[in-house]
Image (tube, helix red, strand yellow):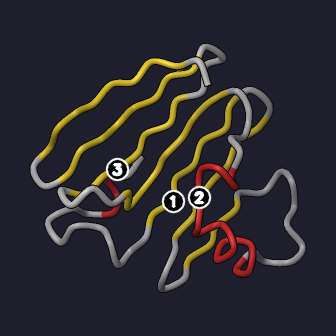
Amino acid sequence: MHAQLRTMANEGYIVQQIEAADGMVVREYVSSTGLVFGVAWQGPQMPDLIQLLGASFPLYEAALPAPVHRRAPVVVHTEALVVEMSGHMRAFSGRAYLPNLVPRTLAPEVIQ
């Protein structure tokens, strides 16, 4: 991925923002211990969720409502994983986080 990386330090966590040449912006939320506890994205197409969610992708797949309508927002809320995404052609956005890893001092709404 040919992209620019920006790092923003906050109290208790870091946000790493990756901006690709195609307009995709991905933000990784990293705890002070180095664990990624959340990601958010926006761009002209859907990102590769397997790459973005990593080891959590099987949890996402298992929790997907059936059937998934292409134009409807996708919302998955489990104890282990939250994924919310929506969009249309050239304007997709979403976020995913692991509720048990979000720092206690941070509201999940900050992940966006």
Side (left or right) of 55 relative to 105: right
Q: Earlier along the polypeptide chain: callout 3 or callout 1?
A: 3
Q: Position of residue 33 (x, y in %)?
A: 21, 61
C-alpha gap between disc 1 and disc 2:
8 Å
> Quarter of the image holding residue 72?
bottom right
Residue 53 marker: 2
Q: Do the numbered discs 2 and 3 sit on residues whose CB atoms are within 8 Å? A: no
List the residue tagged with mark 1. 96
Q: Are marks 1 and 2 in contact (CB under 8 Å)?
A: yes
Q: CA distance from mark 2 to mark 3?
A: 12 Å
Q: Quadrant of the N terminus?
A: top right
Q: Amino acid at mark 3?
A: Tyr
Q: Position of residue 3 (x, y in %)?
A: 52, 19
Q: Residues within 10 Å of mark 2 (few under 14, many from 20)?
A: some
Q: Label 1, secondary structure: give it.
A: strand
Which of the two residues, 107 or 46, is positioned nearer the viewer here? 46
| Image coords of residue 43 (percent x, y) | 63, 29
N-terminal of the two: label 1 or label 2? 2
Mark 3 crowd level (few <14, some 14–19, many ≥20, 10 Å Cα) = many
Image height of 112 relative to 73, above or below = above
Circles 3 and 1: CB atoms closer than 8 Å: no
- Residue at horizontal 27%, vertical 30%? 7
Sequence-wise first label, 2 or 3? 3
Residue type for callout 1 = Ala
The residue under the point 48% across, 86% down is 79
Q: Is residue 52 left or right of residue 17?
A: right
- Left/right placement of residue 66 relative to residue 44 reads right
| Residue 29's disc number | 3
Crowd tier of the residue under label 1, counting other residues whose Cα lies within 10 Å: few below 14, some 14–19, many 20 or above: many
